[in-house]
Every structure is written in structure tokens, then in C-alpha cells.
Amino acid sequence: DAGVIQSPRHEVTEMGQEVTLRCKPISGHNSLFWYRQTMMRGLELLIYFNNNVPIDDSGMPEDRFSAKMPNASFSTLKIQPSEPRDSAVYFCASSPSTYNEQFFGPGTRLTVL
Amino acid sequence: QKEVEQNSGPLSVPEGAIASLNCTYSDRGSQSFFWYRQYSGKSPELIMSIYSNGDKEDGRFTAQLNKASQYVSLLIRDSQPSDSATYLCAVNPSGSYKLIFGSGTRLLVRP
């Protein structure tokens, strides 16, 4: 079975540009999570979807960040405009139900110059 | 106090030894506990889950849970250099969908 798929794997952009990260969860999983990982702050939960509905976006750092899940097999995380401090690895994870283990995608390494 | 605490390490053990990784958590009502392994530059990979007190074994890995003392541990028997990675403890607090991650313990297995 395919795991969580993320694209792109690497993204280098300039400050002020729009960045869109994509995620395809594991088929049949109804919970999806977006995380950000940095050396300083570790793994931070940004937003959680259940059955395609955003349940908790309290971890989204600013209004520059937005996330959507138009259907059960696709989610996007958008940063507009991007800033150098957004540089991090962004992970998408999915889970078969709310309280179960989460399975992570390979991540997108974002560098904002 | 952090919600999930781990010693950052590095924990250095010789090849073939038992590596013992520990984690404490603050929410006494937590129900689900997970260990993830993360190689440098890679994503966290789930290696163990444990839900009830006691030991759970899977190959060379044993997870131990003591809810009364609020700690969970991971033992790796016959450690191999390929086990060198950062091990993240994750806890699902009571009534929450979130996983709270520790900062991870870096394990180094010396050949």
C-alpha cells in the first residue's frame, strides 16, 4: 500500500512568493495532520482535519498560512507571502481514526531566501 | 514542565548492547503512547504503539508502559549501527486528538 504522499519534496523560493505544499493521505484514513519541524521548535502541529473538515487550526502561526482539504484524498498547505522564518520541513500525516497512530509522509523541505 | 520529556542524548551504546530510551509525560489520563524513529533528513516512522500497562514486544523492540509513574520506555536489544537515529516519544492526552511529541533522544550505536 502506498503511504502518505507529499509534493514537492524540496522547495526553494524567495521571500514574498506563494508556496503550496500538497499531501495525499493513505486511502481510508479519515484524519489528516500538517506538522512543521525545525531544530529549535521540534515537531509542531499546524492543523488537523477530520473527515475533510478542519477541526483545529490553532497551530497555524499566522494568517499567511492556510490549509484546505477539498476531498478525502488531497490536502494543501499554502503560505502567502512566504518569509525566511518559514523555512522548515513540513510533514503531512494521516491516521485511520482520531485517536490512533499517525503515519507520516516524506515531508517537504522548504527554504525561503 | 513539558508535556512529554525525553533526554536529548546522545545515548551511545556499543553494537550488540541493549539501548534503553525513556520518556515521561504529564497528563495522567493519557491513553495512547507511541515511539517513532527518525533518521537524519527523513520523516518520523512509527515503530511501536502501546496502550496498556506492561511490556509489548516486537522483534528486537520492547515498549514498556507504567501509567502510575507516567513513563514509557523503549528497549532495543542487540543494537545495530542501523538503529542510530533520533527516537521520538509521542503521547495522546486524554480526550485529545493530538499527539504530543517529545523532543527526541538521539541514539548512536558504535560498531
Image (cartoon, rainbow, N blue to C red):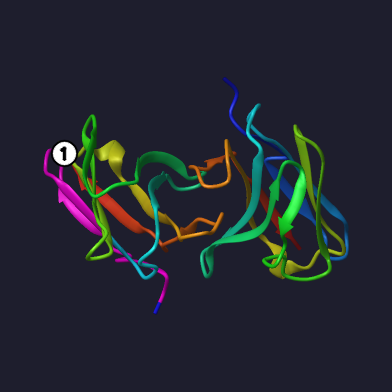
Q: Where in the figure is residue B52, as x and y percent of width and height?
A: 29, 47
Q: Quadrant of residue B12?
A: bottom left
Q: Is residue A64 magenta?
A: no
Residue carrying label 1: B77
Kind of residue at badge 1: Arg
B86, A112: nearer the viewer: B86
- Residue count near mark 1 (Cα–Cα under 10 Å), binned few <14, some 14–19, many ≥20: some
- The part of the chain drawn in magenta is B2-22
Q: Please determine whether, in this image, residue B23 is positioned above or below residue B45.
A: below
| Residue at horizontal 23 percent and vertical 64 percent from the top | B68
The picture places residue B99, in percent across and down from the top left corner, at 50, 55
Q: On what subunit does the disc labeled 1 rest?
A: B
At x 57%, y 35%, the residue is A96
Q: Is residue B78 left or right of residue B33?
A: left
Give residue B84's quadrant in the image: top left
Kindly give the residue lying farthest to the top in the view shown: A1
Task: Tell me the residue at 64%/49% (across/down).
Answer: A33
Quadrant of the snapshot with the C terminus of chain A: bottom right
Q: Is residue B8 inside the magenta stretch? A: yes
Instruction: Give left or right: position of B91 versus A18.
Output: left
> Split into 4 quadrants, where in the image is the N terminus of chain A?
top right
